[in-house]
Amino acid sequence: MRKRTIPFYLASILLLAAVALISTRTFAASPHQAPHFFLKHTSPTASNLAYHGGPEMTGTANVYAIFWEPTNNVQVNYNSLIQRYFGDVNGSGLYHNNTQYHTSAGKDPSAEHLAASWVDNGSYPESPLLDSDIQNEVSHAQQAKGWSSSPNNIFFVFLQANENLCFDNSHSQCASNYFCAYHSYFGSTTIYAAMPYAASFSCNPGSSPNKNDADQTINVTSHEQMEAATDPLLNAWYDSSGNEIGDKCAWKFGTRNASGGDVTWNGHSYIVQKEWDNHKINCVLTGP
């Protein structure tokens, strides 16, 4: 019996048709790096951070905020308060604490600014979302807005309320059962942070100085931002147990003011956790 074959021209047509069926929002996510999770409950050690030779976000880091909100299911002023935080944290004692952590070239993370933001009302491809969806959303935002990857660019992907996120299809590491947020990278220098809606997933710092769900997300954002600045590719500053600058002080706050914040920057109050200071061998809100 003769083996039947598909003519070359027909195979080509079938291939093109298959490609056309792929959503324009789907990008080839790179093989997963194990992300660095901000756990709901931590028990870090008191040992100092050590340098492991990797790069940092030295000088001024460029923050790109992606608000992925298909139905705009966020509290009023949620997005604007997060944007305000990125403007206020620059020049703060909390961000200055990063400057003690140098690269082998003697450079350090000294500043940040909100380079751009975008509200994407595109639908979620699945629920719960997976890390691959977050990576694809970063790539989608880059294509839509003309943004690019670099060692000093970080992309925060903020999700709307009640949208669960899991690392992979096992659903064993999710916002609903394991973490509050995480940071990672794909490719060689696409640095990103995955930011579920903290108020939906028991990530409450215990007060709300701005009387908004954004307060809970801002605390988690601060944690991820300081960690990404000092350990963007997960091979720079962490301790002997793998804890980064924020892990060692997770859920540790300063004295709260009348509004419930523990810091005031540019006249605006926030509740943010402390960060590790190698000089003081302790958690601080201002350093080094």
Image (cartoon, rainbow, N blue to C red):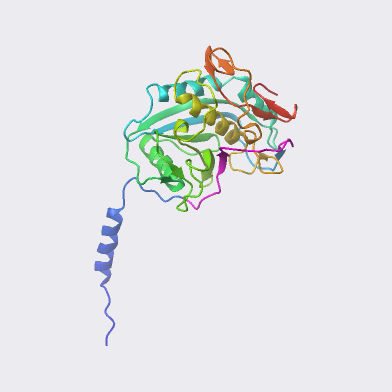
Foreground residue among 199 and 71: 199
Viewer-proximal residue among 263 and 260: 260
Name the chief secondary structure element in magenta.
Answer: loop
Residue nearer the viewer, 244 or 76 = 76
* Whether residue 57 can be seen here: no
Task: Say which of 128 and 26 sits in front.
Answer: 128
Would residue 250 be found to the left or right of residue 169 on screen? right
Q: Is residue 231 left or right of residue 77?
A: right
Q: Position of residue 217 (x, y in %)?
A: 49, 29
Residue 214 visible here: yes
Magenta extent: 30-49
**Residue 46 falls inside the magenta stretch:** yes
Q: Quadrant of the N terminus?
A: bottom left
- Residue 126, given in percent of the width and then of the height, sits at 36, 46
Confirm whether the magenta stretch covers residue 62: no
Q: Quadrant of residue 234?
A: top right
Question: Where does the image place residue 210, in percent across and percent down from the top left?
Answer: 47, 18
Q: Residue at x 53, y 31 (%)?
A: 220
Q: Position of residue 229 (x, y in %)?
A: 59, 33
Residue at image location 37% in from the left, 45% down from the top? 127
Q: Is residue 91 above or below residue 243?
A: above
Say which quadrant the C terminus sits in.
top right
